[in-house]
Amino acid sequence: MQADNRSSMILQTTREDHLIAWLTALAITIHLAESALPSPLPGVKPGLANIITIAVLVRFGWRVAAWVGVLRVLVGSLVLGTFLSPTFFLSFGGAVASIAILGLASLVPGRPFGPLGYSVLSALAHMAAQFGVAYYFFIPHAALLHLLPVLMTAAVIFGIVSGTIVAAMFRSSEKRC
Amino acid sequence: MKMLHRHIAFACLALLLALLTACSREEPVHHIQLLTFGTIVDVTLYGVEADRARQVFAAVEEDFKNMHAAWHAWKPGPLARVNELLATGEAFSAPPSVLPLIVRSQELARRSGGLFNPAIGRLLALWGFQSDERPPGPPPAPDAIAALVAARPSMDDLIVDGVTVRSTNPAVRLDFGAMAKGYGVDLVIDHLRQMGIQNAIVNAGGNLRAIGRRGDRPWRIGIRNPRGPGIIASVEVQDDESVITSGDYERYFEYEGVRYHHILDPRTGYPTQGVAAVTVIHDNATEADVASTALLIAGVERWHETARALGIKQVMLITSDGTIHMSPAMAERIRFETEQPPHVIRSDPL
Amino acid sequence: MRPGDLLVLLLAAVLVSYLYLAFWGPGTAGEYAVIHANGSEWQKVSLHEEHEWQVPGPLGTSTLEVRDGRIRFSDSPCQNKACIHSGWLSHGGEAAACLPNRISVQVIGRDRRYDSISF
């Protein structure tokens, strides 16, 4: 993109690291902002921070995305003071499930998934895991199951929205460069 | 790089959002159910932290335990002692835990035209209602009932001079059952206020007083259906309101197919008939409790004038056949929760 | 939109539909009751699972029976048996207690409509 070929090798790596650091910081910030928003049902968050994770997955691969995802939850919880609290276990469970499914999906030969597919898969896994943690460890009774369809619907919707945003981001940045 | 700039802008916006929306995610509502005061007591607090709520609940439980011991109508304690001394006819110094009830109930008994009469303890004992156990039946003999009614025990038979009390009628035996729950709730609400609590509900056996609000909405109170399952009506209360219900379903026994409940008409000595429940909304719980009993005894014919005399403006009276009588002030705010609209008769304003 | 994306969307649609069928059908209202023993919460019980709960108290064991979305005291070591006479509880807010055995039960309705009940 710029500078001469000799130093661009080194520069490119450094810039990429910076970008990853920025994206992680951004993901964390969005995570923090989301946690301050009231949610109509417990556990229903717009999942905006996931946009970053998916974008990183598409651009930089699964390993980096895994880092961003885990760091986002860890640092976010430390900043909020919810580390090792029930909220933390919910977020962490969701993040682990989401990363795991993204890992499996990215291994499928032929790369059939785009940002939309990854995003929906990730949102489904995230919400399912959060619900599982909540149901088995915190509120084990039938009333909670009644919420599950609603939560999963929300997950699908937010997954589609996030995936669309990520796809749009990449389309516009491709045009730019 | 454009993308980086966009991300910085986004991050700033996100940070701003985080700073602006510093709202708590969990609702600060705390509730406890205590088995005390001879009944189920529910206390709900809004707007305090869990630790503070625990402290407050402990204090409230202590209050109810003390009041239960002081006002117990038949177990040994201050009230039992007062009853012993009243029977002698001699003047004595009334214990400070009981004297206020005597003074207050004298005034309210008068205003209710004697329908509220806490001096009929002997009648209640005769029917078997002064016991933890359900009376097995049969109902007492009519002669026995008539004899006690003829003795006409009344709060007017008590002469109160400062802290000294004397009874001019040995038939007087005090049982504050029709007033104690309301009075107890009032005392506990006062205590809550002293502790700095501004939003709470204290509910002793279905007699409740609510102060403040539940955050951004009023407190929602359900009124039990006296003749079926579930809730018949609901009402929203806030700031400082008591919702007290008296019903013929609370304490009773059945004998040979007939139900005898614990609200006795002092004039006849028998449980009242015809009215299933009365709900009163009023500021303090003591007067509301007294009124709900007095109006149930007054019946369809005389509830209106009795409510007037007691200064009660919001009344709902449900008869045994399901007809609902309401004052206009009550009709305005009550919301029926039944599938079929009930038969409602609106009275004149109170 | 890649082929894999479409597959994922179809999968999501199927999954969510199944969940609604499984958890929103009639009889899955998810109402439950809270049983308190000796002042603290003993158990939250679903009103949709038939069960007999044996609750220990100072006088002995009280039995609470759950059937057809309702709960009641079916047996209790107290003398009064007022708890048993309270009958079946089914609606949110309804409560019964065995005071001598220090056991109470309250139905929590799905939408927690009322903050308190006057009765």
Image (cartoon, helix red, strand yellow):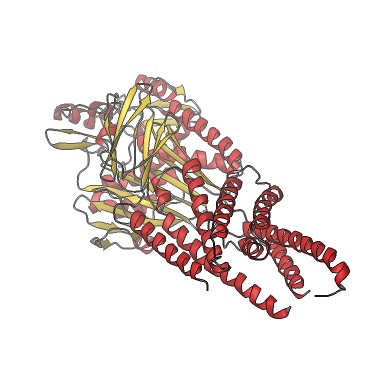
Q: Position of residue B47 (x, y in %)?
A: 58, 49
Q: Using residue A40 as the reference point, say whether residue B1 is left or right of it.
A: right
Looking at the image, is A131 positioned above or below residue C83? below
> Tag count in the figure?
0
Out of B210 and A80, give the one closest to the viewer.
A80
Residue A121 in sight in this render: yes
- Residue at the extreme left of the image, as rendered: B256
Q: Position of residue C77 (x, y in %)?
A: 29, 23
Residue at point 74% right, 61% down?
Answer: A20
Out of C61 and A128, give the one closest to the viewer.
A128
Residue at point 54% right, 61% down?
Answer: A109
Q: Using residue A72 as the reference point, say whether residue B61 is left or right of it.
A: left
Q: Position of residue C107 (x, y in %)?
A: 36, 44
Looking at the image, is A133 positioned above or below residue A38? above
Q: Position of residue A83 (x, y in %)?
A: 66, 44
- Residue at the extreme bottom of the image, as rendered: A175
**Quadrant in which residue B19 is drawn:** bottom right
Out of B170 and C72, give the one closest to the viewer.
C72
Residue at point 58% right, 44% down?
Answer: A86
Residue at point 39% right, 27% down?
Answer: B72
Looking at the image, is A114 positioned above or below residue A66? below
Residue B243 in sight in this render: no
Q: Which corner quadrant holds the C terminus of chain C?
A: top left
